[in-house]
Amino acid sequence: EALDILPAHLRGTDTMLRACTQLGHACFEQQKLREARKAYAQYFSWLDDSTQVDVLACRRYGTLMLSSKEDLKTAQQISLYWCRAEPSVESWLFCGIVFEKQNQNATAMRVLRCANDLDNRHPTVWGHLALLCLRKGDVPLARKALTQALRLGLGDGSLLEEMAKESLRLGRMDLAEFLVEKALECKESIQSHEILAKILLYKGQMDRSRAEFESVEALAKHKGESFERREPFASVLAAAHT
């Protein structure tokens, strides 16, 4: 709240820029994320071309902005600040993810290839390249990128889950099943179990599909989340209780 009553002649000074980043970092580390967002937003609103950008502020504020579709344009601007201040695989990867989330897939692919040029042994970069290949339907190239990602130790369950959904959309059931099982090795996820249940249902493996849908219900109840039985999958759940 102190930022709101700051005298005009102090706004944007080096001292206040440092104060904003220090406040943002302190709030971020204490998980006071609303306050962190406000401090970081003020910091970036005062930046000009002569200011040395705080890279940690880019990383943290950018991460906060990724969580909402409404904030993706802000995340894009932050990613550009970050790439200019510190051109690294992490900054280019973040920038690529921002464009990917906005479905600007061609731009995301170009940016991620730049990240790959900086470090071709980064598993998450290869993983996002695989996802983008699946989005454009290039399954052979996606498999090559995926092989590299897994060989290098990709352990991002959410990313693997996204790849599984794209494979399901393309009708590549075996690839989708492989990916969602890899995702579940990384983390338990209601959505991953539901994707796997749908895949198994499409493949006619009713008993396994029923077991996965039961896992979805059990996980949802454990987490206190609602689970709506949706057709045509509701019939599988109904059969489980007969």
Image (cartoon, grey):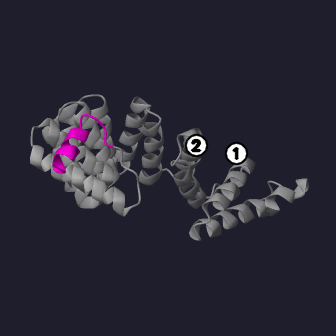
- Looking at the rendering, the stretch of residues picked out in magenta corresponds to 229-242
Dot 2 or dot 1: first in sequence order is 1
The alpha-carbon separation of the residues under discs 2 and 1 comes to: 23 Å
Direction from residue 187 to residue 64 in the image, left or right:
right
Q: Quadrant of residue 100?
A: top left
Helix, strand or loop under label 2: helix
Residue in the image at 37% along x and 35% along y: 109
Q: Residue furthest front?
A: 242
In the image shown, does 110 or 193 lie closer to the viewer?
A: 193
> In this orientation, does residue 124 appear?
no
Residue 105 screen position, x and y as percent: 40, 32
Image: 79 above or below 121:
above
**Circle on res. 71:** 2
Direction from residue 91 to residue 209 in the image, left or right:
left
Residue in the image at 24% along x and 34% along y: 232
Disc 1 residue crowd, few under 14, some 14–19, many 20+, Cα 10 Å? few
Residue in the image at 9% along x and 38% along y: 204
In the image shown, does 151 or 36 lie closer to the viewer?
A: 36
Residue in the image at 23% along x and 54% along y: 214
**Circle on res. 33:** none
Residue 103 screen position, x and y as percent: 43, 32
Q: Specify the amino acid type for callout 2.
A: Asp
Helix, strand or loop under label 1: loop
Q: Specify the amino acid type for callout 1.
A: Asp
Residue 236 screen position, x and y as percent: 19, 42
Number of callouts = 2
Direction from residue 9 to residue 78 in the image, left or right:
left
Q: Mark 1 sits on what residue?
A: 49
Disc number lying in front (2 or 1)? 2
